[in-house]
Image: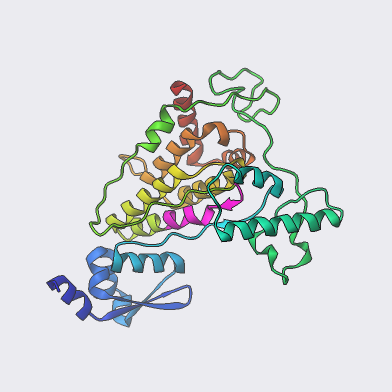
Amino acid sequence: MSNLDETIFSSPPFKFIVEGKTFYVHTALASEFSKPLGRMMNGYMSEATQGFATLEDVDMGTFVRFSRWMYSGDYAAAEYTTSFTEPPESIYEQLRTLTPLTGEELRAYRAASSLTSQARMSGFGGLGHVSSTSTSSSQPSGSIFVSQSPFQSQNLFSSLGKQPTTNSSLFGSSSPEPKTVPLNKLKISFSELQYAVLDKRCNALPPRANKLSSEDYTEVFLSHARMYVFADKYDIQPLKMSAIRRLHQTLKVFKLYPARVADITSLIKYTYSNTKDSDNEPDQMRALLIHYVGSEMDILVKSEELKKLIEEGGPFVGDFLGVVGRTIRSQ
């Protein structure tokens, strides 16, 4: 056992209260990774005097991941969920081109097929949104409802390679369908991004690639983004770099179906609400997401979700317009 191990495991535990639940971590270990936390536990702050700290700015899942990372050098991202936003017949077509399904995926498909049949027998013309918990017999009957598809065909300028005319709008729906943007320089450069490994203990497995458009990766993405924000606030640079590297690896293998654009816009909204650029350089997470937007511009630009995000304004709009220019130049 090293001297550091002896110091860590002989140090007293410190109590953290997160979302009403109590957690204990070794004082020396948390102090080793985070100077702000070290001052909170060992200095003259009220938390050190009273012997515990209530963290209002972190959710329980993030704190558990942080604790696991401190002790093991790794953390488990959140699990994806399944919500069917299109008829299972469309999902079946996707399945035919994929590797054999796991038992969980087969059960999810069969459940969706059953729900669709029930909806049609009840007089519904199609399946709207059915959450993954809708298969439970205790779920209210209102769990199945019909909704108009939000993925209307809209485009930027009339194609990304043309300048806007006087009667064009950023998301004008009257212009013809844009041609599919080929694999461009932004897509290639996004896949080649590298992030430093500051933690020698890092041993995370490669991320799982999504297989169906019904697989919701919102919480998967947000679990990494929340870790990044937490690590940035408490000055834990190895964890910060681990979180952004793992998010990048997940985005690299993520197939952006039109039905999954909301997963990305939710991630963008969280990131821009909880990070800020410095005077000298942009925030790394913001830069990563803007690069991703450029690499998937052909899909994102046709979505209602991105349109709404643009309409909300804020610093994302300026960054988005910058990547639009780079996307046009890359073609």
Task: Tell me if I can see residue 214 in this picture.
Answer: yes
Image coordinates of residue 299 in percent, x first then y, are: 57, 35
Q: Main secondary structure of the magenta part?
A: helix
x and y, in percent, of residue 67 in the image: 35, 69
Residue 153 left/right relative to 46: right
Q: Considering only vertical position in the picture, is 303 above or below 331?
A: below
Residue 55, image quadrant: bottom left
Q: Quadrant of residue 177?
A: top right
Q: Residue at x 43, y 53 (%)?
A: 225
Residue sticking out furthest to the left: 3
Residue 218 horizontal/vertical position (percent): 53, 53
The residue located at (27%, 76%) in the rendering is 26
The residue nearer to you, when weighing 253 against 283, is 253
Q: Which residues make up the magenta segment?
A: 213-226
Is 276 within the magenta?
no
| Residue placed furthest toward the right | 123
The quadrant of the rendering that contains the N terminus is bottom left
The residue closer to the viewer here, 171 or 242, is 242
User: Which of the 4 image quadrants contains residue 40?
Assistant: bottom left
Q: Is residue 325 left or right of residue 103?
A: left
* Spot occupied by residue 214 in the image (x, y as percentages of width and height): 61, 50
Q: At 55% from the left edge and 18% from the top edge, which residue is drawn?
A: 163
In the displayed structure, 150 sits above or below 214; it is above
Residue occupying image coordinates x 37% and y 54%: 243
